[in-house]
Image: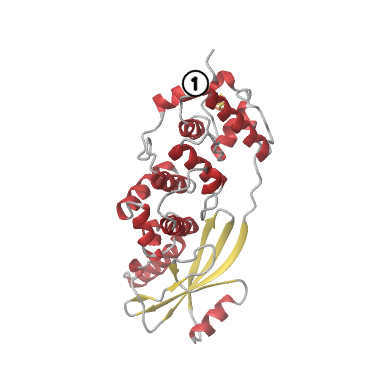
Amino acid sequence: MSSVQTVLLEWFRQHQRKLPWRGVTDPYKVLLSEVLLQQTRVEQTIPYYERFLARFPSLEALSRADQEDVLKVWQGCGYYARARNLHRLAQQVVAAGGVFPRTSSALRALPGIGPYTAAALASIAFGEPVAAVDGNVRRVLSRWYAWEKPTAGQIQQAAEALMAGLAQSQGPSPGDWNQALMELGATVCLPKNPACGRCPVARFCLGQAAPERYPGAKERKQRRLELTALVLQGPGGVYLEQRQGPILGGLWGVPMEEGPGALARLLVRFGLERAERLGSLRHEFTHRKLHIEVYRAPWVAGENPASRPLSRLDQKILALVEANLSSQHSPAG
Ligand code: SF4
């Protein structure tokens, strides 16, 4: 009788989606695809992957780039810390001779590489038999074993046991196996309404009678942040400054402060007496819900926002300013 590995790999060979990084084993390209996939849906990832490679075709080219250029190409993709880490990683690997470490444990010493990315990269690019566990794999394995509240260790052990079974059969690539599990999670064993009727491994699955029970929902707490943004408009555009800190650090945006008294602090900082309130916006990051009050004041000089890497949040703020201006200029009635 066929093993779950044989059945799933055969399904993967026949039904995998055609994606630009399929069959690619260049570690730089594999890493880029993995980093992008962690934050965006596959369809959105493809243009970023192609754009990034067109601009920085090799690790060497990326290592020589300015951080601002890297962020500009990444613009709109979110999670800018990942772009900054990718850039630092390129500089570090190139400085050490330009050759990637070949094992997941050595890869984990590089900037921004966690256990999942290290395992995915080592298995796909170098054939190391290590299990890569992401959210898709966690869900699929929880269902196979009908585990409502599996611990991370339990899932990891199960994934490693499956990888060990694959290694014994000598032949298929560990990278294909990891990708096959993820592909099943992404296209068949979906979080809601999994397609058990067309699932290639249904006969191995203990959870298919009530798949959505497994795994139980994880609680996710989102912190709420109150922010005030001050758009300073002058000849040539708006005043922009480079942000510091972990969230949008390295990107450019309008001056912003957090918490009570934020507007007063902004006015003092720019020597202004008052600013006009334009409205408010909401914006979400994975663990943060932002509420932003937007103000505007005239300023001595500004620059064209298109020339800088801006976050989506700043693009939203500037769109609010634009909408306000056009409503003021449209004929009354
Ligand atoms: S049978 Fe259903 S729940 Fe089980 S792995 Fe397949 S799609 Fe997921």
Indicate left or right for 214 with 90 as reference: right
Q: Which residue is at 51% across, 43% downward?
A: 103
Horizontal and vertical percent for residue 61?
34, 57
Can see residue 171?
Answer: yes
Q: Which residue is at 40% across, 82% downward?
A: 299
Q: Is residue 159 above or below residue 14?
A: below
Q: Which residue is at 37% across, 40% downward?
A: 21
**Quarter of the image where ligand 1 sits:** top right
Question: Badge 1 local density, few (<14 within 10 Å), some, or many (20+)?
Answer: some
Q: Nearer the viewer, residue 323 or 307?
A: 307
Indicate left or right for 331 with 199 as reference: left
Quarter of the rendering occupied by the C terminus = bottom left
Indicate left or right for 61 with 256 as reference: left
Q: Which residue is at 61% across, 29% downward?
A: 161
Q: Helix, strand or loop at disc 1? A: helix
Horizontal and vertical percent for residue 250?
46, 66
The kind of residue on which mark 1 rests is Thr
Name the residue carrying label 1. Answer: 6
Indicate left or right for 154 with 304 as reference: right
Quarter of the rendering occupied by the N terminus = top right
Q: Quadrant of residue 288?
A: bottom right
**Residue farthest along the front direction in this orientation:** 97
Horizontal and vertical percent for residue 11?
45, 23
Horizontal and vertical percent for residue 244?
51, 69
Q: Nearer the viewer, residue 79 or 120?
A: 120
